[in-house]
C-alpha cells in the first residue's frame, strides 16, 4: 500500500512545493521549470543578454545538491559517462530550443495545466507525439551505446560548480546579473527556493521521477506507475491553485505563455522526442547529473547552450508569441534530432552478447 | 547459458534488451550496472512468471532468469 502511494505522493509534493514557491514570489505556474531556470542562470552569468530572465535560480542548485546528497547517502552515487557525450550535448541544446518555443519544460507544462493554462494541454499532446516518435526509434533499436565508469571528478564537477554558484549568489552577488523586471525578477526567497530544490532533488532521485519516462513506459511497457504521479500532481495542483487564488482557466492572459497552439504543440513535441533520445526529461537529466552521471551533466550543459542560443538569436518565444527565428530553429532542431535518431538506430554496430 | 551484457546502457534499453532476448532464449544470464535497471528487469521477469536468481558483485548486478 505504502509502495503504491509513493509516486502519487511524489506528484502531490511536487505540486504543493511549486504552489508555495509561486505564492512566495516565483512567476505564475513556475514553481519549477528546469528549462526556464537553467536559462535564467545562464543569463545571470552574462551568457545571454535577455535582461528579463537573469537570476541564479537556487532551485536548480538545490536539485543538483539534493540528488548528490541522497545518492551518496544511499551509496548510489555513480560517476558514469562516455555514452555519446557530444551527441547528448547537441540533443540537450535542441530540447532547450523546443522548451523555449513552448515556454517551459515538461514539469512546467503540468504546472501550467494545473494553473488552468489550456495552452499547455495543447503542449501536452505535442509532448506525447514527440515521445511516440522516440519510442518508434527505441523499438527499432535506437541506442547511444554504453557508458562506463569515469573519474570521480567527472561526477563531482557539476555539484561543485553548483556550490560555487551558490557561494557567488550569497556572498558575491555583484558578480552576477539580476533581472529588475520580467520573470527573472520574480523570485521566491532564496533559502526557500534552495530547500525546495534540495527536497525535489532527493525525492526525484529516489522516485526516478521523469516526465518523459513516465509516458514512454506507459506506451512501451504498459507500465502506468509514473502516470499516477502526474495525475496526483495535476489534481493537487488544481486544488492548491484554487485555494491559493492562483488558478486562471483559459487560453488568453496566461503568465509566461503564448496562445500559438501549433507552436505550443511543436515545441513540446521536440522536447518529448529529444527527452526519449536522451533517456530522460530535463528534470531527470539534472537529477542524474547531481548523482554523478556525466552524460547527463553534458546534456545539462547542452541545455544551457541551447538557452544561450535561444536568447542571443531571439529563438525563444515570449508572451507575445513565437519569433520567426524560433520557427526556423524548430525545423533545424527537429532535423538534427531525426538525424541523431536515424544514425543511432539504423547505422550502429554493437552486440550485447558477452 | 547465454549471457547478455547490458551494463552501461541507459534506461529503458536494458529492459528492451531483456524483453527481446527472452523471445529466443528460455534461460539466460543478464548483466546490468545500475540499481534502477536491476529493479526494472527483476520486476519485469517476475511479472513474466520466470524463475529469477540475482546476485551483486562489485558494480555488476547478475540476473539469471529461466522459464518454468
Image (tube, coloured by chain):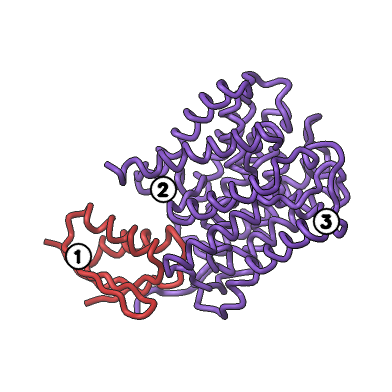
Q: Share a chain, discs 3 and 2?
A: yes
Nearest to the observer: residue A18 or residue A252? A18
Looking at the colours in the rendered structure, which chain would you say is drawn in purple? Answer: A
Compared across the picture, whether B5 is left or right of A316 comes to left
Compared across the picture, whether A90 is left or right of B68 comes to right
Is residue A75 placed above or below A104 in the rendered structure? Answer: below
Front of the two marks 3 and 1: 3
What residue is disc 3 on?
A173
On what subunit does the disc labeled 2 rest?
A
Quarter of the rendering containing residue B5: bottom left
Q: CA distance from mark 3 to mark 1?
A: 56 Å
Q: Position of residue B41 (x, y in %)?
A: 31, 60
Q: Mark 1 and mark 3 in contact (Cβ < 8 Å)? A: no
Secondary structure of the residue carrying numbered label 3 = helix
Chain B: give its colour.
Answer: red
What residue is disc 2 on?
A217
Amino acid at each position: 500500500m505504502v509502495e503504491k502511494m509513493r509516486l502519487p505522493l511524489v506528484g502531490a509534493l511536487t505540486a504543493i512545493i511549486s504552489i508555495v514557491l509561486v505564492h512566495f514570489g516565483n512567476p505564475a505556474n513556475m514553481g519549477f521549470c528546469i528549462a526556464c531556470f537553467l536559462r535564467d542562470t545562464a543569463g545571470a552569468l552574462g551568457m545571454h543578454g535577455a535582461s528579463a530572465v537573469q537570476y541564479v535560480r537556487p532551485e536548480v542548485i538545490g536539485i543538483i545538491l539534493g540528488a548528490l546528497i541522497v545518492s551518496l547517502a544511499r551509496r548510489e552515487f555513480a560517476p558514469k559517462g562516455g555514452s555519446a557525450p557530444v551527441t547528448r550535448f547537441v540533443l540537450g541544446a535542441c530540447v532547450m530550443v523546443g522548451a523555449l518555443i513552448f515556454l517551459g519544460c515538461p514539469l512546467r507544462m503540468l504546472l501550467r495545466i494545473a494553473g488552468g493554462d489550456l495552452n499547455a494541454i495543447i503542449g501536452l499532446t505535442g509532448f506525447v507525439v514527440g515521445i511516440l516518435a522516440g519510442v518508434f526509434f527505441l523499438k527499432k533499436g535506437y541506442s547511444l551505446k554504453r557508458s562506463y565508469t569515469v573519474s570521480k571528478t567527472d561526477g563531482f564537477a557539476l555539484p561543485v560548480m553548483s556550490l560555487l554558484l551558490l557561494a557567488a549568489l550569497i556572498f558575491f552577488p555583484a558578480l552576477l546579473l539580476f533581472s529588475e523586471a520580467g520573470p527573472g525578477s520574480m523570485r521566491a526567497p532564496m533559502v526557500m527556493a534552495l530547500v525546495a530544490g534540495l527536497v525535489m532533488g532527493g525525492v526525484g532521485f529516489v522516485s526516478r521521477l521523469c516526465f518523459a519516462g513516465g509516458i514512454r513506459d506507459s506506451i512501451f511497457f504498459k507500465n502506468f506507475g509514473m502516470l499516477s504521479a502526474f495525475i496526483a500532481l495535476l489534481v493537487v495542483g488544481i486544488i492548491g491553485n484554487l485555494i491559493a487564488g492562483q488558478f486562471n482557466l483559459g487560453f488568453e492572459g496566461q503568465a509566461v505563455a503564448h496562445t500559438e497552439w501549433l507552436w505550443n504543440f511543436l515545441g513540446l513535441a521536440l522536447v518529448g522526442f529529444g527527452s526519449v533520445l536522451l533517456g530522460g526529461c530535463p528534470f531527470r537529466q539534472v537529477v542524474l547529473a547531481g548523482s554523478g552521471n556525466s552524460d547527463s551533466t553534458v546534456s545539462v550543459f547542452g541545455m544551457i547552450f541551447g538557452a544561450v542560443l535561444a536568447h542571443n538569436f531571439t529563438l525563444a518565444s515570449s508572451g507575445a508569441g513565437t519569433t520567426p527565428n524560433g520557427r526556423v530553429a524548430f525545423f533545424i532542431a527537429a532535423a538534427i534530432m531525426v538525424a541523431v535518431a536515424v544514425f543511432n538506430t539504423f547505422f550502429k554496430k554493437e552486440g550485447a552478447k558477452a | 547459458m547465454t549471457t547478455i551484457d547490458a551494463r552501461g546502457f541507459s534506461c529503458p534499453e536494458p529492459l528492451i534488451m531483456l524483453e527481446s532476448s527472452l523471445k529466443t532464449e528460455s534461460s539466460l544470464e543478464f548483466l546490468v550496472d545500475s540499481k534502477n535497471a536491476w529493479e526494472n528487469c527483476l520486476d519485469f521477469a517476475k511479472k513474466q512468471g520466470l524463475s529469477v536468481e540475482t546476485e551483486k558483485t562489485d558494480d555488476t548486478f547478475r540476473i539469471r532468469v529461466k522459464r518454468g
